[in-house]
Image (cartoon, grey):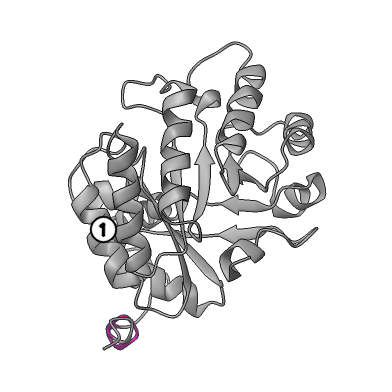
Amino acid sequence: MTPFAALHHRPGRPLLLPNAWDHASAVALAAEGYPAIGTTSLGVAAAAGLPDGAAATRAETVRLARRLGRDDFLLSVDVESGFSDDPEEVAALAVELAQAGVAGINLEDGRADGTLAPAAVHAAKVAAVKAAVPELFVNARTDTYWCGQDDPEPEAVRRLEVYQRAGADGVFVPGVTEPAVIARLVGRVAVPLNILLTPTGPGLAELAELGVARVSLGSLLYRAALAAAVATAAAVASGGPVGPVPGYADVQALSGS
């Protein structure tokens, strides 16, 4: 078991994975003691002026992974759907990321048009990645709860089972917030379950009690940073107080060598 995988197997202590969008945000989070940092595809895409989930940010994702992979924290990279429907191309990307120092990837079955890729297509990607880079932790994500189905649970369970059989090290179901549903999903999978934390859903302590192994923040921090930037500008314009912010030297220090 790799050090990153081991963080998913601590009963009652889920891995809280904060998601960064550039080098400074990743290093700042690591400095707070988080042993692993993820990336957010929305943050990476929006920072580059590109759409998320549309296979438009492969170059930006690899470039950021190469920079962050040199740091001393464990890194998981959000690769959307692998930027391709060809399993061999997705596996080649995984090899490239592993060589850059990446410990895990998040691989989703949602498509830009709001539909889901066929489960067999996504499973083939998972299997190809695990065959090419067995040590890379593959978090297989299903966007079933984001596709507007009246009762997404049965389809989510079916897909999780397919992705597990393909070799996924963990599975991820963003969009589910009902504690009873989360508990049932935990009981249906044999690998660690990842849940996306939402401001209106269960908190970290409750998710731990439900048996969740990993809690991701997704794009939450990036969106909070945007809100804080706009609020700070508004405060200056209105003559109001500006909250505490890192100093120039503090941010400069995040650049490293």
Highlighted range, magenta: 248-252
Instruction: Note whether residue 97 is visible.
Output: yes
Residue farthest to the top, as pictured: 150
Q: Residues within 10 Å of mark 1 (few under 14, many from 20)?
A: some
Q: Position of residue 254 (x, y in %)?
A: 33, 81
Q: Which quadrant would residue 121 be assigned to in this image?
A: top left
Residue 11 vertical position relative to residue 89 in the rendered view, above or below:
below
Question: Is residue 251 shown in magenta?
Answer: yes
Q: Amino acid at mark 1?
A: Val
Residue 160 falls left or right of residue 235:
right
Give the residue displayed 66% in from the left and 65% down from the top: 6
Q: Position of residue 22 (x, y in %)?
A: 30, 64
Q: Quadrant of the C terminus?
A: bottom left
Residue farthest to the front, as pictured: 131
Residue 132 falls left or right of residue 201:
left
**Foreground of the two, 223 or 165:** 165
Give the residue displayed 51% in from the left and 61% down from the top: 135
Q: Secondary structure at mark 1?
A: helix
Residue 205 falls left or right of residue 72:
right
**Foreground of the two, 111 or 164:** 164
Give the residue displayed 31% in from the left and 63% down from the top: 65
Residue 127 vertical position relative to residue 138 in the rendered view, above or below:
above
Q: Quadrant of the N terminus?
A: bottom right
Q: Which quadrant would residue 186 be assigned to in this image?
A: top right
Residue 151 vertical position relative to residue 60 in the rendered view, above or below:
above
Give the residue displayed 34% in from the left and 57% down from the top: 95
Residue 22 vertical position relative to residue 111 in the rendered view, above or below:
below
Q: Position of residue 223 (x, y in %)?
A: 39, 49
Q: Name the residue carrying label 1.
A: 62
Q: Which quadrant would residue 193 be assigned to in this image?
A: top right
**Foreground of the two, 190 or 240:** 190
Q: Position of residue 184 (x, y in %)?
A: 78, 31
